[in-house]
C-alpha cells in the first residue's frame, strides 16, 4: 500500500467518509495470539480458509500439547503433522478425543463436522514403501474436506498396473503422485491425464537416490507438462495444495 | 488393464455385445503422427485439452519449421517455447502469420480464435531481471485462454510493494510467483493469499545462487503451505499448470 | 499402438477375422494381482522370464511375509532382497522352507528346481569389505540359474593379484565387478577383458568417498570401454543384468 | 613487519632509545598457556576484549573440566558452548558455581560482574523449532554484556506477526535473525530495518533443506542489502559478532 | 500489527483522538514509484538511510538508463553496481556527470555532497586477483560516506605481510576481508583483531575452488569468532554492511 | 600371477617343457606402439575384439590426424568419436576415404569389410534433442558389425508412442535407451522388455537437470531391474557395450 | 612390457642366455597368499618397504583376528588401523603381545625391533578435537621407524601459537598438518616452512563443514605451494607418506 | 612466540646480552616489497628455497609484466604459470630473454644458471589429453633444478603399457601421476611403486566427471597408500612438491 493510499483511507475515516469496518476490510492481513514460545495465527482460518497446522518436528511433546490446549477453546479443527507416538500420548492425555493416524504420523482433533466437497482427489503412489507419505497426503486432504481415491503401488516398472487405473485417476479433479527412486511416475501420469499433477518425491531408495534427491530432480525436470513439485516426503504439503485446487 | 478385463472387452466385441466405438473409448490413450525426427502427438489436444507444445531447445531452426509445417494443416493453435530469433525467422519465412514474443522467447500461431475464461491468473515477479521468465508464463497462459494480471518487481526486500498489491493478487484464481536469488517471495505470498501458489525459481543471482539452486531449494522448503514448484526458469510449465487450475 | 491399428484389431475381432487369443497376444503387457498394499505382477515371469523380486527395504516384516504367502501358491521361485534377520524370522515362521543368506541379506524360496545354463558369470570384488554386495550379486544370479565364479579381494592396489586371475575372469560370459573407495577396478578389468563388465560401486570408504559417490563417479567416467554401472551397493541389480546377458 | 622495521626496533632498544615496554606494545599479538592437550590463549581477552570460549564438541567432559580448572584461577568469566548435560555435570562437580543453560547448551562461570552497555541486540527467530539456536545467540551475547530483546516465532509465512514487531526490532543496534527451511526471514527484516542484520541459518526442515543448506544459500543470496551470514546453527558466532557491533 | 491495534488506531482517527500524520507515522513502511518494469523505492533512503542501489545484472543498458533518469530528479545520490562499460556509455550519454569506476564496475552519480564520518573501514584482500571485488566494496562504502584504508595482497601464504599491517587494519572500526582460493584470510585476521570482520569469498581459484565454493565454506566454518560472510564476489554487500556498522 | 607360477613357467621353458609360443599365450595382455604423444594399443583388437577408438576431445586436429596415419597402415578399421568438423577436415586432407557422420560427431575409416551379426540392437530415444547421442550409439555399434533399429522420440510423456513400438524394441537382443530431463524412459522400457537395457542419460534439459545429473540419478535409481547405465551423453560407450552383448 | 620384450626374455631363457632368477627379477610385481576372504600381499614389504596394513573398517573382529594369525608367522611387524576396542579384544585374546593405541584406534604387533631414522616428522594439529586423527598419523609413522614431534592446538585463530613453534616445526624433514573447520592451517604452515606439507582435513566442525568438505576444499585450493592433501580423517595415509618422504 | 620469550629477547638486547643480528635470526619470517597492486615476497627464496611464482590467472598482462620488471633487477629466476600467449607477448616486449612454454602455459626467465640435483622425478600421465597439465608439472620442476623423466599415455585401460614402464617410473625419487576421467592411475602406480606418489586430477572427461570431481574424489579415496593429491589441473603445485621432496 503506498503512503498516499493509506493516507487517503485515514483521511476518509477522519472525515467520516469511510467506516472503520470498511477500512478494516481494506487493511486486513494482520493479527495473532501469543503463548510464549509460539504465536498462534488464528486469523489464518478466516484469511486462507484453513486452520494453522502444527508441524511437530523440533517441538517437544509438551510444546505440542500446549498449542493444542491453547487452540482447543476456539472450536476449530486441528491437525498436527510429523507427530510421533510419544507426542500423541502427551496430547491425548489431556484431550481424549484427539485421534492418531499412525502410518501418516498425524494427530487430528475434530471440533466441528467436516463438510466435504463433491469432487475427489486422486492419490497415486509408486510402491508399498511410499505409503506413509501417501497417507500423510490423504489424511490431510480428507481432513480439509476432500473425498480421496487411493491408487497405490502402480509404479512405472509395471506400466500396465497404471494403465488399468488411469481412467479413474483422471476423474479426480487434481492428482497427487508420490514416488521415490527415480521419481518417474508423475511424468507418466502427467502425460496420460489432463488434470494438474502434484509430485511428491520420497526418500525411498538408496545410493544414488541421495535421500530423495534423484526423485526430486526427476520430477522437477519432468518432460510432461502439468507437473509441479513439493519438498521430499512432504505429503502434507501436497494434500494441502490438492485441497486448495479441489475446492476452487 | 488386467488380462481378464481386456479379454472381456474383446470377447464382448466378438459376441457383438460391444461396439468398436465403445471399445475404442475404453481403450483410448494411443496414437500419434510421425514426421521422421519427431512423432507428433495430435490426439494430445483431445486427450489433455492442450495442443502439443514445441520445445525448441536442442532442435535446429529447420526442425522446428518442419514441425510447424506438419502441424499447420490441422487447424490447431501452436506454441513454441525457448525459440531464439533465428528459429523464428526460419518459421516466419514459410508461415508469415507466426508471431514472435521476444522477451518470452515464444512463437505462437493462431489458427482459431482463443476463447478466454473469466477468472484471471496472477503473475507476480520479484525483480526486473526475472521478467523474461514471468513473460514466458504470461504469454503461454494467455495463449491457453486465460486472462492475466501482472504484478512485477514486488520482491521481499521492499515488502510494502507486495502489500499494496496483495489484495488484487489474491483475486486471481491461481498465483504464479517468479523469483531468483533466495526465492523467498512465494513463501510470503503463500502466507498472505488463500489461492494455490506455483513458484518458479530463476537463475537470477550469482555466487551461492548456483544457477538457481538457492531459489529452488528455498521454494521447496517454504514454510508456507500451498506452494508447489516447477523447474528453474520454467515459466512455460508454470503457465501451463496455472491454466489447468484456472480452467477447472 | 496408434488408434488406427487398435481399431483394426477390434474390427477384425468383430468381423471374426481374428481370434480373441491372437488379439490377446498382440495386446499383452497387462495384468496383475492385488493384495491391498501391493499389486503382485505375476505375469512378469511370463513377460520377462524372471519372478518379481521382493525389495524389503521400507516394508515391514509382516508385509513381506504377506507377499510371500500371496505368491507362494503360484509355484514360482521367490527371492527377497535387503531382508534383515527379523524379516526372515517372520517369513520362516509360516514358510519353513524359506532360506536365509545372511551376508547377502537375501531370502529365497525354491518351489521348483533351478535349471542352470552352462556359461558362468565372473564376480570380482576389490576388497574384503565389499563382500556383502558381491554376495548379493552372486546369490541372486545363482538363483536365476547361472553358475558363478567368485574372484574376491583383487583390488588395484595389488594389481598382480588381479593378473593371476584375469584369464579365468575373462572366461565368464559376463563380468560383475564390485569396488568401493575410488572404484577403479572395473576400468582395469575392462581394459584387460573382452566381455561386458557391470560395475557396482559400494559405499565402502570414508571421507571423500561420500557414501559411494567417489566409486560411482569413477566407474561412470571409466576410461575403459565396455563398462556399464548400476546403483551404489546394488548387488542384486548387477546379478540380474548379468543373468540376462549370460542367458542370451 | 618488515625486516628493516624490526631491526630498527631492536637497534633502538639496544641504543636505549626505546623501552622494552614500548617495544612490547609494538610487538604484541603473542603468548598462551599450555595444559597439554590445549593451549589456552589468555592474552585473548586483552587482545580482543573477550575471554576465549570453550567449544565443547569433540572434547571429552574431562578435557572441558580441566580447561575450566586451568582458567578458573585467572578471574575471567568463562563460557563453554555446545556443552551437553554430561559435560556440565563433570564441570559442576568441581566448580559448583558453574551454571547450565539447557536449551542453549551453554555453561557459564561468572567470576566478575558483567557490565552491560545501554543499547540492546534484537534476536529474531522464525519458528519455535529455531529456539535452541536463538537461545545460544542470546545467552552468549548477554554474557558478553549486552541487553537482549527476543522476538520469536515471527516467520515469513505470517508476515503480519513480523510487522507488529518490526519497529521494536529496529530499535536494537544490531539484529540477529535465525531461520531454517527457506531462510527468508533475514531478507524481509533486512528490507524493513536500517540496522545490520546477522543471519543464522538453522538445520530445521527436511528433504531439500539438506541439513540447513537451503537456509544458508537463501541468506547468502538475500536480495536485501545489510545481511551477513554465519555458519548453520552457529548461534554463538552470531551472538559474538552482534556483541562486537553493539559495543562499538 | 494485530487487528485490535489497527482498529484502535482507526477508531481514534475517527473520533478525532489521533491525527492522520501521527497515524501515518505508526503505519510507515509503505510507498514506491512505478516506471513500468521497475518499482522505485524512494522511501528507502528515509527508511534505511541509504538510496536504493541499482543492480545492473540482468537489466539492459536502456533499463538502467531509464532508472537513472527516473531517480535523477529526486536529488539523491545514485549508485549502480555490476555495470559493464556498455551500460555506463548508455547512462553517460544522457547524464554526463555520471562517473564510472572501471575495476569496481560501478557507476556513481553525485547530486549532493557526501558527508564523511571520522572512523575508517579497513579493506583487506588476499591477492592481486581479488582486487575487483575489493574495489567494489571500497567504492561503495566510500560513496556511502566512509573513509577507507586499503590493505591489498596480504594473503596467508606470506603471513608476515599481514602482520606488518595488522595494527593499522585493527584501527578501522570494521574490517572487510576479501579472499579466494581457500578463503583463510578472515580466520587469521579474525584471530588477531578485535573488530567485526566481514568475509567476502571470491571465485578466484580453479578446480576444487568450484567458483568460490571453497572460499565460501572456509569462511563460514572459520575457527575464529567475529567473522560473518556475504555471498561470493559480493563486494557491494560487504561495503554496505561495513558502512552500516561504521556509522553506528 | 603369483611368483611361484611365473617361476614354474620360466623353469619349464628353460627345461624345454614349454614352448615360447605357449608361454606367450599364458602371458598375453602386453604390448603397444608409441608415436610420441600417444601409445597405440594395437594388440587391443586381438585382445578385446575391437580396434582402439580415438577419443578426440582434448586432442588437436593434428594429433588426431597423426594417430590416423600411424594406425592406417595396419589394415584395421578406425573410429574416432567426439570429432568436430575441423578435426575431420584435417584427417580427410590426407586420408580421403575417411567418412564423417555429422550428427554423431564420428569419423570412420573402413579398411576391411564389416561383417554383420544377425541379431539387431534396439536404439530408443526419448526426444528429438537426444538424437546426437542416439546417433553416436547407432553409428558406433553399426561400425562394430551390428544391425541397428532406431526408435526415436518415444518419451514417457506420451507413453502410447512407446507401446506401439515395444514389441519391435524387445525383438532386439539388447536395448540402448537414451533420455535427458528426468531420464525415466529406461525404467519404463525395462519394465516392459525382457532384454538387457543400457541407459544413456543426456544433458538435454535445463535448471534442475544440472547438465544431465537428473537423468543420470534417475537411471541409476531405476525401479526396474535390468537397467545399467553409462556416463552422461556417452553414446559411444553404450554402442560398444551393446555390441559386446549382441555378439555374445 | 611389450610382447616383443617378453618374448625376448623367454627366448633367452630357452636358449640358456638368461637365468630364471634374473628373469624373475625383471618380472617381479607379482605374488600373494590367500586365506579365503583376503589375499595377503606378503611380497608387498619387499616391493614397497612396508608391511601390508590391515584396514579394519567393514571387517568383522574375527576376520581381523584371522588376518593377524595368518600374518603372524612371517615375523613382520603388523599394524591395523580403524580398529575399535571390540576388534582389539578379539585379536589380543589369541595374540597377547598385540598393543592398542586407543585415541589413534590402532593395533600394533611388533615382531622385530623397529629401526629409527634420524630425521623427524613434524605433526601439527589445529585443535584439541583433531587429536585422534593426528595420533593416527603419529603412531603409524612412528611404527614405520620415524621419530615424531607433536605440535598440537596451534590453529590459525591464534596465529602466535603457531609462530612460537614454527622454527621447530620446520626442522622436521616433512610436515603433517591436521585441521578441521576451514582447514586453513596447512596454507599458513606452507607459507612459513620450506618442507613438504601433507594436509589432512578432518570432519571436525558442523554445518557448512559438511563432514570435512570445507577443510578438504580449503586445503586443495591452498594459496601456498608445497601442500598436498589426503582423504578426510586419513591420519594413517598422511603418516605413511610422511614416512616415505622422511626415509628417502 | 609468547610474550615472556619476546620480552626476554628484547631485555637481552637492551642489556647487551644479545646482538641485533642474533635477535634478527630468532625473529625472521618477515619482510616484502610493495609495487602497489602486489607485495613481492623477496625473502621467500631465502625462507623456502624457491622464488615466488607469478600466478597469472586474474591478472592483466600489464600487471604481470610489471611484476616481472620489479623482480627482474634481483637476479632471481622467475616463473609465471597459467600465462596465455597475450601475457607472454606483453612480457617479452620489454624482457626479450623471457621464454614461453606453450603447452604448459608457462613463462620462464633465467637470470642465473639452474643447478640440477642427480635424482629424477617421474612424471606419469594417463592420456594424451592430460599433457598440458603434465607439462606444467614437468617444466616447473625442471626449472627448480630437477631432472625429469616423462611417461605419458599409460592409463589403466591398457595396464600393460604401465607395466612396461613401472620399473623406470619407480627409479624416480618421487612420482607425479596425472589423470582425468576416473583418476585411477595413482592407485595402480601407488600399489606397484615404493616412492611417494603425488596425484594430479585433471578436468579431462565429460558428464559425471563434473570438471575433474570424479578424478579428484577417486585419488583422494585411493585404496593404495602413499598417494597424496593436489588441486584439479594443478600441475605446477605437483611439480613444486615433487621438487621439494626430490631435493631433500
Image: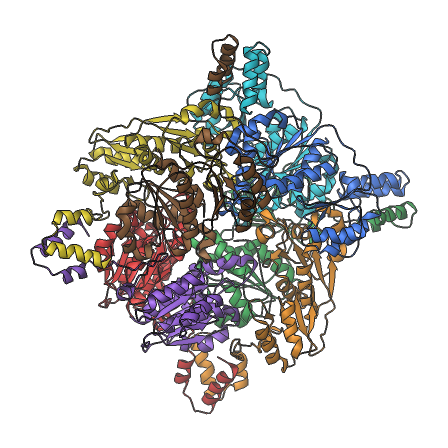
Chain colours: A orange, B green, C blue, D purple, E red, F cyan, G brown, H yellow
Location of the C terminus of chain G by quadrant is top left
In percent of width and height, residue G223 lies at 33, 45
In this rendering, is residue C178 above or below A77? above
Residue extending farthest top? G15
- Residue toward you, H140 or B63: H140
Quadrant hosting residue H68: top left
- Residue toward you, D218 or H193: H193
Residue extending farthest front? G96
- Residue toward you, G179 or B4: G179
Residue A84 visible in the snapshot: yes
- Numbered disc total: 0
In percent of width and height, residue F42 lies at 53, 19
In this rendering, is residue A186 above or below F248? below
Quadrant hosting residue H172: top left
In percent of width and height, residue C221 lies at 53, 37
Q: Is residue C219 left or right of residue G201?
A: right
Residue under the point 22% across and 29% down: H97
Residue B200 visible in the snapshot: no
In percent of width and height, residue F22 lies at 59, 14
- Residue toward you, H177 or B43: H177
In this rendering, is residue E24 above or below C8? below
In this rendering, is residue B87 above or below G24? below
Quadrant hosting residue E95: bottom left
Amino acid at each position: 500500500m503506498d503512503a498516499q493510499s493509506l493516507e487517503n483511507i485515514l483521511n476518509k475515516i477522519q472525515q467520516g467518509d469511510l467506516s472503520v469496518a470498511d477500512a478494516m476490510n481494506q487493511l486486513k492481513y494482520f493479527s495473532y495470539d501469543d503463548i510464549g514460545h509460539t504465536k498462534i495465527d488464528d486469523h489464518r482460518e478466516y484469511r486462507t480458509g484453513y486452520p494453522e497446522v502444527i508441524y511437530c518436528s523440533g517441538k517437544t511433546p509438551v510444546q505440542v500439547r500446549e498449542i493444542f490446549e491453547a487452540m482447543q477453546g476456539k472450536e476449530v479443527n486441528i491437525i498436527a503433522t510429523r507427530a510421533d507416538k510419544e507426542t500423541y500420548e502427551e496430547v491425548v492425555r489431556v484431550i481424549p478425543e484427539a485421534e492418531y493416524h499412525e502410518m501418516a504420523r498425524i494427530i487430528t482433533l475434530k471440533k466441528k463436522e467436516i463438510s466435504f466437497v463433491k469432487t475427489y482427489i486422486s492419490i497415486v503412489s509408486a510402491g508399498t514403501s511410499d505409503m506413509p507419505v501417501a497417507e500423510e497426503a490423504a489424511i490431510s486432504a480428507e481432513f480439509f474436506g476432500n473425498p480421496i481415491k487411493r491408487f497405490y503401488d502402480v509404479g512405472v516398472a509395471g506400466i500396465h498396473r497404471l494403465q488399468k487405473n488411469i481412467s479413474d485417476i483422471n476423474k479426480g479433479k487434481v492428482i497427487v503422485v508420490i514416488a521415490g527412486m527415480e521419481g518417474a511416475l508423475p511424468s507418466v501420469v502427467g502425460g496420460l491425464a489432463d488434470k494438474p499433477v502434484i509430485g511428491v518425491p520420497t526418500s525411498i531408495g538408496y545410493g544414488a537416490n541421495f535421500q530423495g534427491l534423484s526423485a526430486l530432480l526427476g520430477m522437477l525436470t519432468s518432460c510432461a507438462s502439468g507437473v509441479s513439485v513439493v519438498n521430499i516426503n512432504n505429503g502434507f504439503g501436497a494434500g494441502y495444495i490438492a485441497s486448495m485446487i479441489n475446492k476452487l
